[in-house]
Amino acid sequence: MTTFGVTFVAATSQELEDLELAFANVFEGLISRSESRLLITVYGEGEYGYIVAKSLAIELESVLDVSIISVDQDLVDISEIARRTSRTRQGVHHLVTGARGSDDFPTPLGAPGGKRIWDWSSVNEWFRTHQAPVDEEVWLSRSEVAIVNAWLVERKSVSLIEVSSGGSRLDEHTAVWLVHHQPRCISKPRERNWLASSGRIVTIEPRVMAQ
């Protein structure tokens, strides 16, 4: 199993001190504020990072008074890479340009104002492959961040799922899990039938939340 680290951008109406106390009782990680953003860094184990991240997002919202907005990519420039890796800016510049070591340093995400920036995950994995990782845990790749952020946007549009056999209602987290993981769920005859494998007993109908 791989230990993944994820930093979420979140929103809450709760005081930071109270939120940190509730967080520490259940999770391993850190809650911080960066400018006006609330950042929650949390860790989980699994085979695939995007699955771990989805599970962590659901668990955070079920335990804490928070709404998970997106995955933070943790953008870094040459100066920040130098700080985190205990190298000089010139040394990092040589790695970036290929003047030292291999010439396959990750491609920057962009260069706003002429300053090249990378996502920390790609940089850390490059060091893991070529030298030694700065962080032991694995952070979500660029593609995994895109997958989870798209899922977070989509799940906000689903308020509930109605079960037609009796009109029972599922809570939002269960509804989202069913949509993404079990679109034709097995029946649970000894519990409540949410969906039938035949598709005849139950139908699902996402409701779009009012804007």
Image: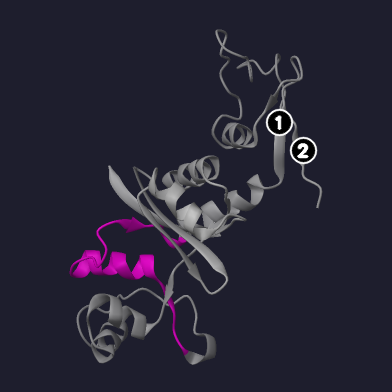
**Label total for image:** 2
Q: In the rendered image, which quarter contains the N terminus? A: top left
Relative height, residue 141 to residue 169 (above, below): below
To which residue does mark 1 refer? 161
Where is residue 77 drawn, in percent x and y? 40, 82
Q: What element carries label 2?
A: strand
Q: Is residue 123 magenta?
A: yes
To which residue does mark 2 refer? 207
Where is residue 162 drawn, in percent x and y? 74, 27
Residue 9 in view in this figure: no
- Marks 1,2: beta carbons within 8 A: yes
Residue sticking out furthest to the top: 190
In the picture, measured across the screen, residue 70 lies left or right of residue 115, that is right
Q: What stretch is highlighted in magenta?
A: 115-142
Of residues 162 and 50, the one nearer the viewer is 162
In the picture, measured across the screen, residue 80 lies left or right of residue 183, that is left
- Earlier sequence position, callout 1 versus callout 2: 1
- Amino acid carrying label 1: it is Ile
